[in-house]
Image: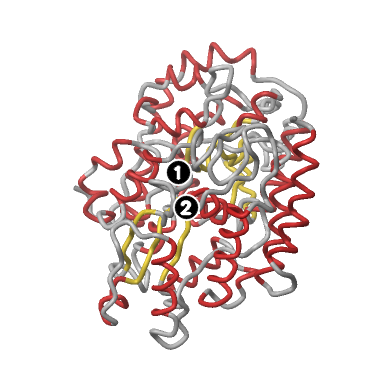
Amino acid sequence: MPHPGRRRRPRVRGRACAMTAALTLLATGCAGAGGTAFGGGDALNVLMVNNPQMVELQKLTARHFTEETGIKVHFTVLPENDVRDKISQDFSNQAGQYDIATISNFELPFFAKNGWLHPLDVYAAADTAFDQEDILRPLRESLTAEDGKLYAQPFYGESSFLMYRRDVFEEHGLTMPEKPTWEQVAKLAERTDGAEPGMKGICLRGLPGWGEVIAPLTTVVNTMGGTWFTEDWEPRLNAPEFKKATKFYVDLVREHGELGAPQSGYAECLNNMTQGKTAMWYDATAGAGSLEAKGSPVKGKIGYVPAPVERTESSGWLYTWAWGLQKASKKADDAWKFVSWASSKEYEELVGATSGWSNVPAGKRASTYANPEYRAEAGAFADVTERAISEADPGNPGTQPRPTAGIQFVGVPEFTDLGTRVAREISAAIAGRQSVDSALAASQKLAEKVAEAYR
């Protein structure tokens, strides 16, 4: 059992030897247009989202990957909305500026179908140290396209759950149900609003963006009986169930949510929870690692329960930030070495040794949840996270059939634009600039245009 301050080097050299067969097989498929290295020489160029786990990876790469392999890595790190735009632009043009990018299970089917990604099956099969079967089944399936090929490897996986200040609840005689409903959460938000100086009852995303406010809101819509589209592509954004869920969400964040809610996304809510500015936070399970990290002011004070429900048994989303290799890259062999390291058991051990096991990019490997070192530090949220991921059902997330798979999104390329434009309407309602009815009336018209292409 390593001491938290002792660095354990990942076994990169041994892993590289295991990949020789795969690299030979794929050598003829690695060339393509573009590929100019702005990182210098043969450096890999990685474009990734600015989540805390990625920032940690950036800090560890030079000493623990480059030193072992000789492969330099140049990172471009951007906020979620910005990074999505830049990835889509570079990969769709096959410009080859970036060899690797963080993509999600939302983009992967479209990117793969358009031929923008390198298949990774042969690499993963030859790299026995990587242990592909250890990747949790929902993530393996979500990163495999319709052609049956694997196109990305998860850096971390997540669902969503409710985080709350257990110490504040105990101090004020409040009890969090083991499986709360949204109505119960609303009442608890009212009771904890102002429980401590400057503390609000709950933090919910209000920031525009299909991957920001739309993600948690859509899980509320699902469990309250709503849907974006029926099985026959009829838009339902102005239906009673969708209206009920949206009004509930908007009212809750306006009455008992964080200050500056229309500008608050994942990062802002994480900061609010860490700094003791909110009693509850409904968001990604990945947030728990930061809350329980060494030096966190709220470490050991947080409780974790499943995503609140109303009409469904569960309502957590399924999401992964994963490593995709651009087809146009001329450095696919080296890119796989980086991806296999960044998504490996060894990398998790490294983070556990340097930053604490609660901070590892988890949610992707079965072995993580069987690791006694991880469970010793992440026991407060490990089981809830694993259960949320395993219970997530992208094909049937609500109370009626859907035209595509997806829990917190609609699985069509047009949703990037549709979700973002609807998010602006919802965010404006949160800001008090318009009513929910007006926001959804405008959103219904936007959805109708998308539906026309599929009906």
Q: Residue at x 55, y 65 (%)?
A: 248
Q: Quadrant location of residue 390?
A: top left
Q: Residue at x 35, y 38 (%)?
A: 346
Residue 13 visible in the snapshot: yes
Q: Residue at x 68, y 62 (%)?
A: 426
Q: Quadrant location of residue 299?
A: bottom left
The disc label shown at residue 133, or none: none
Can you identify the residue that label 1 sits on? Answer: 156
Q: Earlier in the sequence, mark 2 or mark 1?
A: 2
Q: Nearer the viewer, residue 95 or 18?
A: 95
The answer to whether 294 is drawn above or below residue 40 in the figure is: below
The answer to whether 127 is drawn above or below residue 425 in the figure is: above
The answer to whether 337 is drawn above or below residue 202 in the figure is: above
Q: How is colour applied across the structure in the image? A: secondary structure
Residue 44 visible in the snapshot: no
Q: Residue at x 50, y 53 (%)?
A: 224
| Total numbered badges shown on the rendered structure | 2
**Callout 2 touching callout 1 (CB < 8 Å):** yes
Q: Position of residue 300 (x, y in %)?
A: 28, 67
Can you identify the residue that label 2 sits on? Answer: 53
Mark 2 neighbour density, 10 Å: few (under 14) some (14–19) many (20 or more): many
The C terminus sits in image quarter:
top right
Q: Residue furthest bottom?
A: 197
Q: Position of residue 56 (x, y in %)?
A: 47, 54
In the image, what residue type sits under mark 2?
Gln
